[in-house]
Image: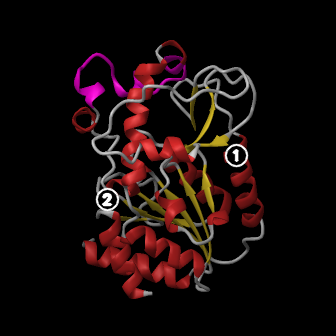
Amino acid sequence: MSTTALLDQAAQRLRAADQLIIVAGCGLSVESGLPDFNDEAGLRGHYPILGQGRFTFQQLSSADFFIQHPRLAWELYGYRLHQQVLASPHAGHQILNEWVLGRRFDSMIFSSAVDDLLPKALTLPNYLCQHQGSMLHLQCSRRCSDDIWPIPHALLDVFTHLPYTPLDTLPCCPICQGVARPNILLFHDPYWVPNRAQRQYQQLSQRMQRFNRATVILEIGAGLSYPVSRRLSEYLKKRLNCSVVRINPEPTQLRNESEDVHICLPAVHALQHLQAQL
């Protein structure tokens, strides 16, 4: 089926829907200039510490690495924060905000992206669950407590400086004075404090229990390398007995092509086409 026909089919399903669940992967952020985590070579070009070839992205992004080599871990994550603070939501984020605000759908967004692009774009942040956490919040790297706190404004200001230079003083936990880390789910992570993400998830899950009309899941930018969002879409599809409209430039084999629609386009391009047909 042609891309135009798939867009028409997706728009038809959205027009017939009363309830819309948006599942956003990290790929949604790529069009705002953030790196594609499916592209290892691209990551090495984005992050100087990876370009040295001493460590992989997964090594630097493990929970134990933050404890054993905190300065090296913050060299990567400080640069990630620098990129995220300077990035702006794109037209696709704004379209999603319009859909959440509008009366056409009862909508909600589950996002595995840990940046603040969706929080910046959304007028109603309570309609968002960042189920992998947020880079704009910190926790103790050893989880001496379950405290989570926003990154202080003074530290955020550091990440806006151009060119970015690694931190001289690492963020610390106010309780044990150990090194703090972003409140996100890292690789092999027994220390993550999930309380904030769980509260968001429970809030949206309670709303979802009232869903009793035509529902569509719109999955955007969810690849197979880190299939967290893909798995969530499949779980919600089974739970709600509904179909998935998938937007992702990478072609993927759908489990049931008769039910689901895959639009092989970048997010902004696809969302603008769909918006024009609603």
Q: Residue at x 46, y 15 (%)?
A: 69
Q: Is residue 231 magenta?
A: no
Q: Toward the viewer: 29 or 251? A: 29
Residue occupying image coordinates x 70% and y 60%: 204
| 192 to the left or right of 29 | right
Residue in the image at 42% along x and 75% along y: 10
Earlier sequence position, callout 2 versus callout 1? 2
Q: Position of residue 59 (x, y in %)?
A: 41, 21
Pointer 1: what residue?
Answer: 196
Task: Give percent across and percent down for residue 82.
Answer: 39, 44
Q: Quadrant of residue 233?
A: bottom right
State which quarter of the image contains the N terminus: bottom left
At label 1, the amino acid type is Arg
**Left or right: residue 120 compared with residue 41:** right
Asked if residue 262 lies left or right of residue 243, the reply is left
> How many numbered marks are there?
2
Image position, residue 226 (x, y; %): 43, 39
Determine which residue is flagged by label 2.
31
* Stretch in magenta: 48-66
Of residue 103 and residue 43, the one placed in the foreground of this image is 43
Q: Secondary structure at mark 2?
A: helix
Please say if 271 is above or below 118: below
